[in-house]
């Protein structure tokens, strides 16, 4: 039997983030399926989709313990990006920016960090 539903809004409040944004009430936080975790590059803790935030098991433990404020703020920015750009727009821009970085000779990690969506999500936490 599945446990209680955890929304991004509830997870944010548990982690000390004061949010009244009801849009986050419609985003579920769930453990990533093992198939997804097998294809994630090393170090990936979470993946934001338009209505779901998938997290690895260690990250879920941190969220429930109130120890994931920075990660939740970062992923909430990605949820907002999905909403601004739409599904096709977000995926197309995200992948194109990553490929552009790789084509310029950047390593995977550097190309990932050079993606404007990642830079925006990171800068909002600084």
Image (tube, rainbow, N blue to C red):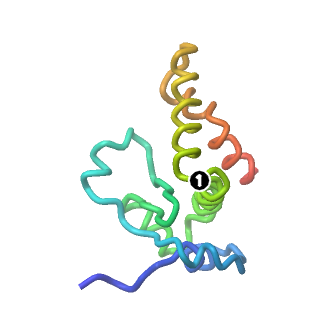
SS at circle 1: helix
Residue 119 higher or lower than 124, as above or below:
above
Q: Residue at x 53, y 16 (%)?
A: 103
Which residue carries the number 1 mark? Answer: 86
**Count of numbered labels shown in the rendering:** 1
The image shows residue 30 at horizontal and vertical percentages of 40, 68
Residue 77 lies left or right of residue 58; in this view the side is right
Q: Residue at x 54, y 76 (%)?
A: 26
Q: Residue at x 59, y 55 (%)?
A: 82
Q: Residue at x 46, y 79 (%)?
A: 6
- Which image quadrant for residue 69? bottom right
The N terminus - image quarter: bottom left
Most foreground residue, 8 or 15: 8
The image shows residue 51 at horizontal and vertical percentages of 50, 66
The image shows residue 68 at horizontal and vertical percentages of 56, 64
Circle 1 crowding by C-alpha within 10 Å: few under 14, some 14–19, many from 20: few
């Amino acid at each position: 039997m599945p446990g209680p539903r955890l929304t991004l809004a509830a997870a944010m409040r548990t982690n000390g983030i004061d949010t009244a944004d009801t849009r986050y009430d419609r985003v579920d936080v769930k453990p990533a399926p093992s198939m997804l975790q097998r294809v994630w590059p090393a170090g990936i803790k979470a993946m934001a989709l338009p209505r779901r935030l998938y997290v690895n098991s260690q990250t879920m433990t941190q969220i429930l313990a109130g120890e994931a404020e920075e990660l939740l703020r970062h992923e909430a920015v990605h949820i907002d990006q999905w909403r601004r750009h739409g599904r096709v727009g977000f995926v197309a821009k995200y992948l194109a920016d990553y490929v552009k970085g790789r084509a310029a000779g950047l390593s995977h990690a550097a190309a990932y960090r050079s993606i404007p969506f990642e830079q925006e999500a990171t800068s909002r936490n600084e």
